Image (tube, rainbow, N blue to C red):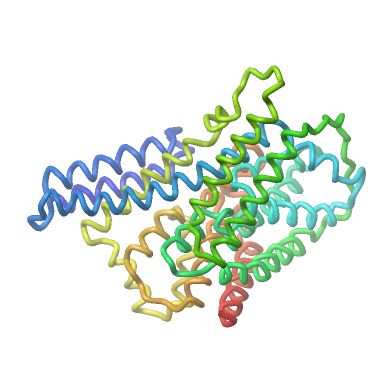
Amino acid sequence: MVSAIILTLITLAFVLIVIEDIIHVNKAKTTLFFGTLCWIILFISPLNGQSPENIQHQLDHNILEIATLWLFLMAAMTFVAYLNSKGFIQNIVHRVMPSAISERKLMFLIGGFSFLFSSISDNITATLISLAVVMSLKLDPKKLIKYATLIIFSVNSGGVSLITGDVTTLMIFLDGKVSIANLLLLVVPALASVALLAIMLSFGLNGAVEFTKQEERRIEKTDITIAVIFLSTIFATLTLSVLYHVPPLLTFLFGLSLMFLVAQFLMRKKDVNKKIIDYIREIEYDTLLFFVGVLLLVGALKEVGMLSKFTHLYELMPAQYANYLMGILSAAVDNVPLTAALLKAEIVMSPQQWLSFTYATGVGGSMLIIGSAAGIIAMSKVKALTFMSYLRMSVYLLIAYTIGYIGSYLAGSFI
């Protein structure tokens, strides 16, 4: 009876995630509500006669995973929140853009920029800035849909090879399934799939666009310093993890503390109303709370023995084919709970197969507009981009995803 109640609550929570744009209730609120409720029920009515101490042990293990992910994202998002609020990122973009460019070249430029920027930033910021660039050009709605489609796919592709670029990649890495050296093998197939999609979407684009140059703002010394610290922290995270197995969380928190100390020193003579540490308040706490709720739900799912059901697909077919289908499934089921569920189900796969799974869950959500944070943001910003208009691009997206997945599996043979 208790298992049925918890499964009903979890199902309802995931349905509310999918229909968030219809009911206008933030998914962070619903997942946190149902996630905590499920664990309270587990304490009140223990399954299979478990003791409160045993349930507490399981919850503690779940909370440790959540805390590790939360702190890492908080540190990374604080860097971006500062640079974004200062207009540093937008200023750089407008400085490097040419005054005029063909629509086809712009397609490749936007794809490459979205791919690169999402690797060193969060997907939300990468999507917003990339969309801001193309929306400033006053393009025809049909053309704008193509650019927005490429941005969504590129942003999702850009983060899969770095633990700083995608949450599911970070989760798989923290679980010890792949190493940073393994993940870097995904750069080539991920970038190739973006280039392929750009080629397909550029058919029919024969015009040219002009950029309206904005007045350049002076880049402050403090902003440049913090940007350097951010990039150095990313580099140090990768290097120290490979060479000395230093946990990425530790390195990023060190980089954040360095940012606070250096900025405090540089701002000591300035009349500023805002302290550097206050930028923590500007990060997307909705995103962080959503992850907390989702991981609590997945933890409860494990307690009622449902995660083992995910292994059935892997019993029916080889892991490389099951991973491909899991990626497409992540377009309908949020890739964070899907990845968490598979990790907790303890499916046995080779490093090559885990690498292809990393690509699949990171990029597969691009198949549907509601399948990723980038898609949902783009839909809210571009009026012409709807569920159905994006669905018309599904053939292009499926081809690009398939080629990228095959490339990721082949790249894993070098492990």
Q: Is residue 165 above or below residue 138?
A: below
Of residues 142 and 403, which is closer to you in this image? 403
Q: Quadrant for residue 104, please give it.
A: bottom right
Q: Position of residue 292 (x, y in %)?
A: 38, 44
Of residues 340 and 378, which is closer to you in this image? 340
The residue positioned farthest toward the left in the image shown: 49
Q: Quadrant for residue 61, please give it.
A: bottom left
Of residues 363 and 382, which is closer to you in this image? 363
Q: Is residue 106 left or right of residue 51?
A: right
Q: Residue at x 85, y 41 (%)?
A: 95
Q: Quadrant for residue 401, please give it.
A: bottom right
Q: Is residue 367 above or below residue 193?
A: above
Q: Residue at x 66, y 40 (%)?
A: 128
Please count the marks in the image.
Answer: 0
Q: Position of residue 369 (x, y in %)?
A: 56, 50
Which quarter of the image is occupied by the C terminus?
Answer: bottom right
Of residues 263 and 83, which is closer to you in this image? 263
Q: Position of residue 412 (x, y in %)?
A: 56, 78
Q: Residue at x 67, y 52 (%)?
A: 149
Q: Is residue 359 above or below residue 11?
A: below
Can residue 346 be seen in the rendering of this structure?
yes
Q: Residue at x 48, y 35 (%)?
A: 285
Q: Position of residue 18 (x, y in %)?
A: 43, 46
